[in-house]
Amino acid sequence: MKTTVFMATSLDGFIADENGGVGWLNELPTPEDKSEDFGFSALMQSVDRLVMGRNTFNLVLEFGSWPYGDLAVTVLSHQAPPDALPPDATVNFTAGSPDALVKLFESLGDKHIYLDGGNVVQQFLAAGLIDEIILTQVPAVLGKGISLFKKPLDEKFWKVDRVTHYANGFTQTRLINKRVR
């Protein structure tokens, strides 16, 4: 099982503003090549399941249309699901430890999971269950907000695999977990 984090951060390390919003991402410079998505489409073609937290799910619902097609989406939450889910979305709500969830997803045949949402990432990091982190740093300074990392990553477990610079000022760093599960 491979687990991947793919997120954007501000220059000062925030994934959302202090209210949990990501509207600031819409104000950033767009690439000259309109088809450039910084590897997101390739990631989505390779994953079997997206695991996100409830706050991230609620934020995605505000987008208007469901962006994940028929990809299996699991929302980690202790709250009941909303009464109405997006049409044609394959979404289930569950709670549990990252270890138990990885075992469950493996038993369902999943081979690659994409993790989204700060709390989910923190839980899987603490459990040592993240294989790669792809961070796209964008040219914005928020000053305050929600950080992806509550403490620095331990250098003995992580290495920088590649850094890609884009003409619109974005810098993407791929980190690989040195530990083999």
Image (cartoon, rainbow, N blue to C red):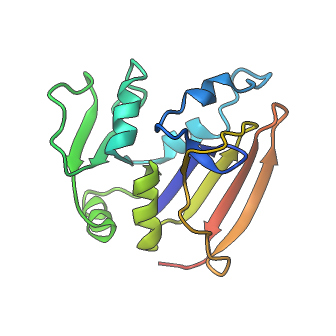
Name the residue: 71% across, 40% down: 141
Q: Is 88 or 143 nearer to us in this picture?
A: 143
Q: Give the percent coordinates (x, y) of residue 14.
A: 60, 47
Number of labelled discs? 0
Q: Give the percent coordinates (x, y) of residue 118.
A: 46, 52
Q: Is 111 or 49 nearer to us in this picture?
A: 49
Name the residue: 59% across, 58% down: 133
Q: Is residue 149 visible?
A: yes
Q: Give the percent coordinates (x, y) of residue 177.
A: 59, 71
- Compared to 5, does 151 lie above or below? below
Q: Quadrant of residue 38?
A: top right
Name the residue: 62% across, 76% down: 154
Q: Dividing the image into 4 quarters, which one contains the N terminus?
A: bottom left
Residue 129 falls left or right of residue 145: left
Name the residue: 70% across, 29% down: 36
Q: Give the percent coordinates (x, y) of residue 128.
A: 46, 74
Q: Residue furthest right?
A: 167
Q: Residue furthest top?
A: 64
Q: Is 136 or 91 nearer to us in this picture?
A: 136
Q: Is residue 71 visible?
A: no
Q: Quadrant of residue 37?
A: top right
